[in-house]
Image (tube, rainbow, N blue to C red):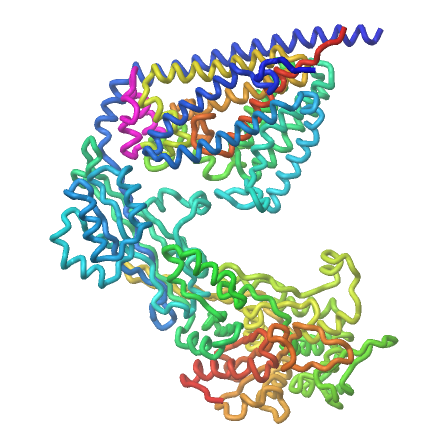
């Protein structure tokens, strides 16, 4: 039997989503060239990472959602095991035990958990009737909480929160009642002072700096002050590509990674920023639409959850760079230099494509 | 029927999920609006304000790194210092013809292709008024040659900066340690503000353990730049606070004597001042030149250090774990007296082997023909194994373990430089937990002569010997004895830290056991009598020979026939003068053969140099 479906369909790709991703990655290369001091080696390294991540996306997209659901609990368990392994045998990299050395590759299990946690929550809730009952919510809460605590112990509070958010978003999509959400929020607010005492010194410092950037003009406060100057001085049309003074005169720190948005805003202005946000919104809307149209509950929950997590990253990064949120060290997806989060990001897009393109034909 | 309900639920579920997705989309749009609002505020409403700030953003903060503290030995000899190192820098805008300049420079100083590659890369990225280094670490000759030719090279200049230097090279490298470039992982631990001008960091030894003291506090200078970033003038300056200097207990001349005595062997020597716990010498051979690491060692040389079977980078004194052999006998003897498992008078017959009741296995004495009838003093001086097999069995592993632990065996000594390991003092609980096996009586026997599971570091042996010398009072061993503020010249001494000591039921037992150790060196039949014959002071010592390789029941140990690495480790512990102990020493010679021949003479050389200030010729 000859398969006469178009190539994209046979490969289970969604061309609109792929287009959005590639354009954003393209914008990323343009900014990186400027932010990285016109270093072509940097671009080549990032290009290799992007290709690797795209390959992962292609592979994941080929896997039918049924299989993804089947594997979800196993992968979740494996992720948990790896997190325990990191706590006990992890390499102390960057001041925290996040890495696991597997001989050939160094591996950050918290990246994997970013996907396995929402997948597990989606799998668990999809088996039950929705909206979830109280007991189901408690179990889902535990599914989220255990890896979150393990990651927070590494200690990597930023990633821990993002993992918790990715799981919580699936719960929200599953139709958890708004009253319940309100109550949990109130409880969390009540626990905030306790959390303060559990935080490391540097974490407390970040919060203080956020509240008053001028208090630390040499450290993190300096980042925010310089970043705001960069963005604000960009104006409507920007200073032009490669002409950002803030970034090129070394005032802006971390300009290839977490603060790449400031470089972009300085050089391309509000106009460029609106185009960039438009691109992100295009990807997110397309993602939500794909989740919306999925046949199975598992696919809907997971696809929607992953798309919203993607938005949370964008929102938190831009919020941080513009001084709306504290500096939490979240990269801007597809624009920031760096490879570790790129693979899990692309795997998430692969899942979305899988959910959207694998349709079970109803016989008869 | 049930099918109907499920179908109905499915439809409801579907509706619910779609609703939620739409709500989510709405929230996304609202939050995106928040971001856009913020950006409009920054980029349109406050644009003028930020544009002015950006235009005026001409004041840069330039960090000034502090000068690292120096390290001195106990007599003021410099062990680590900062030396100016010269690099050749080129300011591109001041050079008329870059290629001609580079060629000309290559004729008078050694410029490699890798230097040129790095330079060209930086040339593209840096601005024209910024100095770009072409070569680092010019030799004095190169500096002189350039100085003569300087007029030919406008825009080229020599920059001096301080780099760490270890004038004595390999001597005491395992104590002092070295600094190296800060790597990415360390960067995350550091106070980035305080290290903003610093490129190097202590990696091992005192350099690492006292990093916080040696480093100092960064200074800043505010510089005004023009729109292109060129420095126009310095606005104000907060000078850096130099790091504190350190005085350490090591006596470099003693260290050198000990290193020379061990030369050619793999081993360790640790000498401690019993009163203060100050480490007078800490030798691990072979050593290495720490200067190699300061500016990045090349991979070939690093591989040769790393892969050498003699493991020069391995600090045997702190990290080497060896069976203590017979050097535990004074401690076990003391335990015997303490727990009344034996008396000074009690005698044991040594036929050259020992058997557990009802077992055929013969635990052999090192002397196959046996020692005959011996009391505790005789058993110590002649190092009779059979006496101690019998005593160990009488004591039992629980009492041996608890008594030895009081001397610090099986525990870290708490020395102030990092990296030491715990060694192992086995116990019933340990064997149950780690091997999941019960304890066997035969294992008690060999524990009594320092074999079997027991492992000690040379530092532990020296520390325990020092406590023996002080009749049970224990002081934590230490390297650094004072911190000196270089600006005021004020010296703050570090007080010795006392540990929980060993108190005996009968204090007279100390002297009885120490007398046994004196007879080891000065007695007619002592195993170390060869180093005692001409000693002008009284030494208490104990030899040890630790098995690396198990010999079969009926085989004979022939040192000559065995490969070197399978030969026994030679050990010796000692302190002197017995009346007023000023030095306690532990010597370990890996595969050195017997403790009396290989290790004891080294200890004698060390003690002679320290107590008499002269060399001992055996």
Which residue is at the front of the view, A273 or A27?
A27
Q: Nearer the viewer, residue A363 or A243?
A: A363
Q: Residue at x 34, y 71 (%)?
A: B77
Q: Quadrant of residue A66?
A: top right
Q: At 52% from the left edge and 17% from the top edge, which residue is drawn?
A: A17
Asked whether the viewer can see residue B546, the reply is yes
Residue at the far front in the pictured view: A2
Where residue B54 sits: x, y (%)? 25, 26
Position of B74 compared to B508: left or right? left
At a point 23% along the width and 49% down the height, the residue shown is B89
Tell me if B256 is positioned left or right of A289 in this view.
left
What are the residue bounds of the magenta stretch? A224-251
Q: Is residue B247 above or below residue B116?
A: below
Q: Is residue B121 left or right of residue B445?
A: left
Residue B104 point in image, percent of width and height: 19, 52
**Location of residue A235 (image quadrant):** top left
- Residue A55 falls in which quadrant of the image? top right
Query: What residue is at 40 percent from the left and 27 percent from the top?
Result: A29
The mark total stands at 0
- The reply to whether residue B498 is in sight is no
Point out the residue furthest to the right here. B358
Q: Quadrant of the N terminus of chain B?
A: top right
Could you say where residue A22 lies in the image, as x and y percent from the top left? 47, 21
Please check the rendered image and state whether residue A209 is part of the magenta-colored stretch, yes or no.
no
- Is B81 rendered above or below residue A71? below
Is-magenta flag for residue A248?
A: yes
Q: Is residue B256 above or below residue A27?
A: below
Residue at the left extreme, as displayed: B151
């Amino acid at each position: 039997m000859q398969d006469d479906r178009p190539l994209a369909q046979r490969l289970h790709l969604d061309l609109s989503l792929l287009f959005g991703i590639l354009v954003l990655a393209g914008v990323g290369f343009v900014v990186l060239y400027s932010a990285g001091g016109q270093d072509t080696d940097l671009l080549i390294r990032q290009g290799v990472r992007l290709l690797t991540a795209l390959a992962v996306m292609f592979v994941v997209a080929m896997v039918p959602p049924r299989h993804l659901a089947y594997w979800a609990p196993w992968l979740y368990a494996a992720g948990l095991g790896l997190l325990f392994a990191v706590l006990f045998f992890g390499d102390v990299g960057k001041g925290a035990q996040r890495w696991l050395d597997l001989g050939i590759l160094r591996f950050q299990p918290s990246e994997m958990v970013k996907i396995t946690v929402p997948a597990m929550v989606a799998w668990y809730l999809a088996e039950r009737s929705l909206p979830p009952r109280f007991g189901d919510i408690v179990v889902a809460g535990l599914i989220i909480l255990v890896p979150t605590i393990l990651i927070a112990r590494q200690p990597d509070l930023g990633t821990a929160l993002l993992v918790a958010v990715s799981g919580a978003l699936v719960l929200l999509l599953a139709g958890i009642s708004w009253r319940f959400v309100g109550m949990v929020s109130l409880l969390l607010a009540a626990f905030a002072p306790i959390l303060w005492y559990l935080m490391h010194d540097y974490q407390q410092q970040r919060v203080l700096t956020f509240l008053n950037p001028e208090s630390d003009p040499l450290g993190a406060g300096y980042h925010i002050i310089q970043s705001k100057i960069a963005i604000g001085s960009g104006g409507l049309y920007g200073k032009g590509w490669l002409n950002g003074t803030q970034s090129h005169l070394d005032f802006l720190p971390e300009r290839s990674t977490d603060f790449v948005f400031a470089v972009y805003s300085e050089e391309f202005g509000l106009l460029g920023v609106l185009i960039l946000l438009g691109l992100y919104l295009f990807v997110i809307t397309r993602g939500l639409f794909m989740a919306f149209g999925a046949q199975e509950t598992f696919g809907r929950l997971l696809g929607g959850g992953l798309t919203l997590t993607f938005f949370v990253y964008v929102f938190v990064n831009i919020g941080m760079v513009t001084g709306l949120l504290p500096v939490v060290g979240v990269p801007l997806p597809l624009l920031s230099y760096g490879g570790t989060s790129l693979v899990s990001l692309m795997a998430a897009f692969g899942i979305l494509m899988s959910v959207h393109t694998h349709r079970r034909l109803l016989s008869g | 029927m049930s099918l109907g309900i499920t179908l109905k639920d499915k439809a409801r579920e579907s509706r619910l999920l779609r609703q939620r997705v739409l709500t989510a989309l709405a929230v996304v749009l609202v939050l995106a609006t928040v971001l856009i609002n913020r950006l409009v505020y920054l980029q349109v409403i406050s644009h003028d304000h930020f544009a002015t700030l950006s235009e005026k953003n001409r004041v840069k903060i330039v960090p000034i790194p502090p000068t690292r503290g120096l390290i001195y030995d106990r007599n003021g000899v410099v062990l680590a210092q900062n030396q100016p190192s010269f690099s050749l820098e080129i300011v591109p805008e001041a050079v008329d013809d870059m290629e001609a300049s580079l060629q000309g420079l290559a004729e008078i100083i050694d410029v490699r292709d890798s230097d040129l590659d790095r330079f060209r890369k930086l040339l593209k990225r840096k601005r024209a008024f910024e100095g770009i280094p072409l070569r680092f670490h010019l030799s004095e000759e190169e500096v002189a040659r350039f100085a003569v030719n300087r007029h030919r090279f406008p825009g080229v200049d020599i920059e001096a900066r301080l780099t760490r230097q270890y004038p004595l090279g390999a001597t005491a490298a395992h104590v002092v340690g070295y600094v190296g470039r800060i790597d990415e992982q360390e960067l995350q631990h550091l106070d980035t503000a305080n290290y903003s001008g610093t490129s190097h960091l202590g990696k091992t030894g005192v350099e690492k353990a006292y990093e916080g003291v040696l480093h100092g506090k960064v200074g800043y200078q505010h510089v005004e730049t023009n729109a292109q970033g060129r420095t126009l003038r310095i606005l104000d300056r907060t000078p850096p606070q130099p790091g504190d200097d350190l005085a350490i207990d090591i006596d470099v001349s003693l260290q050198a004597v000990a290193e020379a005595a061990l030369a050619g062997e793999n081993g360790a020597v640790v000498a401690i001042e019993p009163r203060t716990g100050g480490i007078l010498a800490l030798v691990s051979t072979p050593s290495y030149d720490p200067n190699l690491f300061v500016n990045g060692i090349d991979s070939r040389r690093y591989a040769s250090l790393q892969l050498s079977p003699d493991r020069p980078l391995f600090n045997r004194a702190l990290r080497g774990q060896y069976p203590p052999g017979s050097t535990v006998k004074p401690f076990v003897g003391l335990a015997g007296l303490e727990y009344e498992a034996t008396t000074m008078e009690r005698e044991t017959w040594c036929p050259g082997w020992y058997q557990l009741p009802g077992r055929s296995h013969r635990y052999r004495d090192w002397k196959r023909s046996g020692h005959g009838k011996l009391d505790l003093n005789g058993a110590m001086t002649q190092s009779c194994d059979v006496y101690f097999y019998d005593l160990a069995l009488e004591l039992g592993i629980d009492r041996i373990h608890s008594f030895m632990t009081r001397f610090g065996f099986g525990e870290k000594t708490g020395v102030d430089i990092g990296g030491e390991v715990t060694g192992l003092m086995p116990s019933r609980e340990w064997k149950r937990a780690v091997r999941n096996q019960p304890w066997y009586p035969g294992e008690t026997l060999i524990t009594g002569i320092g074999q079997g599971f027991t492992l000690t570091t040379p530092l532990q042996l020296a520390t325990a010997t020092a406590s023996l010398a002080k009749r049970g009072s224990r002081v934590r061993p230490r390297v650094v004895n004072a911190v000196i503020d270089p600006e005021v010249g004020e010296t703050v001494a570090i007080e010795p830290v006392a540990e929980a000591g060993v108190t005996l039921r009968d204090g007279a037992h100390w002297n009885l056991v120490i007398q046994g150790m004196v007879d080891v060196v000065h007695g007619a039949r002592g195993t170390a009598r060869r180093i005692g014959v001409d000693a002008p002071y009284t030494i208490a010592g104990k030899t040890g020979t630790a098995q690396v390789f198990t010999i079969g029941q009926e085989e004979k140990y022939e040192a000559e026939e065995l490969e070197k690495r399978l030969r026994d480790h030679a050990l010796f512990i000692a302190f002197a003068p017995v009346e007023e102990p000023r030095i306690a020493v532990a010597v370990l010679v890996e595969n050195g053969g017997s403790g009396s021949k290989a290790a004891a003479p080294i200890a004698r050389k060390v003690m002679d140099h320290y107590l008499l200030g002269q060399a001992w010729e055996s």
